[in-house]
Image (tube, helix red, strand yellow):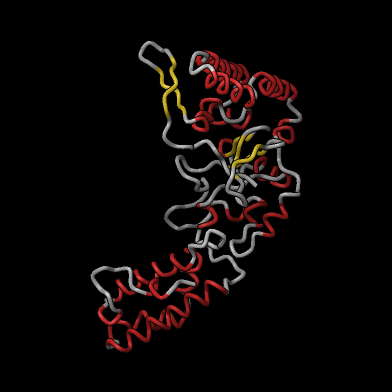
């Protein structure tokens, strides 16, 4: 629980609840909940507690009557709301309030049971991509990167964010809720056990999707053999050891992998938006993991340049 100092209002222009307007009162309640839930071991998002608190009838009564209260009554009401906030932080309701916070923390990884959603078009093919074996990913249950022992099929996230592609930003509702994947159905911000238990269930792979298309399967196997992530890692380690003298090896791998996926995509008639499902993330897309990006000069020459953000580490479970 916060110490006594954290009970002070966050608004610098109003040091006492007695002088707060209703909007300032509400802002300070939201700030208090944020402080209350700041413990990194607390997996329940503050937004969830805020939503639960603001739907509490006692909170609604205080909010509606705030402007009519005198100074002493406002102080008493503020203390009452603090107690309500602490109660809801401890006693999170075991029910989804559809606040959208889980969907903002990452998109789902698909399980074998979800194949039907792709086959019937509930999830478009271009909305998913492959995380290949050996690639680094973020776990929703751990902070550190880990390397996949087998591949995953994952729903895309909105560019530059961890927000699921299917979250409607205006309504905070899932656009495919009736056909949401298995992981989404198991998601519970108040209890991570169901989602963790789900990790023992079989994941969907490209072999499940393309098992009846022998040519595509053969091309995928060949791409995995020639363009493995550990080859890119080795090239970067060699470049670092040589103080940049072997940068051409990195650039060659990038160019070859890009040519392979583009050439085979055209030959097989694979839409550009589905290349990341068939071949996984490109080497170029994984460069931020090494602090780099590719810049194409006016003459077509490719050079490595620093990249400020790590945007390649997808999350999975």
Identify the residue at horizontal 62%, vertical 69% (top origin).
94
Provide residue 132's location: percent of width, then percent of height.
Answer: 65, 32
Identify the residue at horizontal 56%, vertical 27% (top origin).
282
Q: Is residue 203 above or below residue 90?
A: above
Left or right placement of residue 146 versus residue 98 in this view: right
Provide residue 214's location: percent of width, then percent of height.
Answer: 75, 23
Residue 24, picture quadrant: bottom left
Q: Is residue 249 above or below residue 39?
A: above
Q: Is residue 28 above or below residue 80?
A: above
Quick one: 277 or 139, which is closer to the camera?
139
Left or right placement of residue 93 versus residue 74 in this view: right
Provide residue 264's location: percent of width, then percent of height.
Answer: 61, 18
Quick one: 167 or 303, which is closer to the camera?
303
Provide residue 267's location: percent of width, then percent of height.
Answer: 61, 16
Numbered disc total: 0
Identify the residue at horizontal 41%, vertical 21% (top origin).
295
Quick one: 158 or 244, which is closer to the camera?
244
Identify the residue at horizontal 30%, vertical 87% (top origin).
69
Q: Is residue 157 above or below residue 269?
A: below
């Amino acid at each position: 629980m916060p110490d006594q100092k954290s009970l002070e209002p966050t608004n610098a222009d109003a040091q006492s609840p007695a002088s707060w307007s209703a909007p300032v009162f509400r802002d300070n309640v939201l700030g208090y909940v944020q402080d209350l839930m700041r413990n990194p071991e607390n997996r329940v998002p503050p937004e969830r507690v805020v939503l639960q608190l603001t739907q509490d009838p006692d909170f609604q009564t205080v909010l509606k009557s705030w402007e009519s209260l005198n100074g002493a009554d406002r102080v008493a009401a503020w203390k009452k709301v603090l107690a309500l906030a602490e109660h809801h932080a401890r006693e999170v309701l075991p029910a989804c309030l559809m606040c959208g916070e889980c969907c903002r923390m990452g998109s789902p990884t698909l399980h074998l049971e979800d194949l039907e959603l792709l086959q019937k078009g509930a999830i478009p093919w271009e909305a998913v991509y492959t995380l290949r074996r050996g690639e680094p990913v973020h776990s929703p249950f751990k902070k550190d990167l880990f390397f996949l022992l087998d591949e995953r099929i994952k729903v895309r996230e909105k560019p530059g964010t961890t927000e699921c592609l299917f979250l409607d930003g205006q309504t905070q509702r899932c656009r495919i809720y009736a056909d949401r994947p298995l992981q989404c159905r198991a998601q519970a911000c108040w209890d991570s056990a169901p989602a963790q238990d789900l990790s023992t269930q079989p994941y969907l792979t490209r072999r499940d999707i393309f098992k009846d298309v022998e040519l595509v399967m053969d091309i995928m196997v060949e791409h995995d053999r020639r363009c493995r992530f550990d080859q890119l890692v080795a090239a970067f380690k060699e470049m670092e050891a040589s103080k940049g003298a072997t940068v051409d090896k990195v650039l060659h791998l990038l160019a070859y992998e890009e040519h392979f996926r583009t050439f085979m995509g055209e030959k097989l008639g694979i839409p550009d938006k589905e290349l990341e499902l068939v071949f996984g993330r490109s080497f170029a897309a994984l460069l931020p993991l090494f602090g780099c990006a590719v810049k194409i000069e006016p003459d077509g020459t490719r050079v490595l340049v620093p990249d400020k953000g790590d945007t390649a580490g997808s999350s999975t479970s």
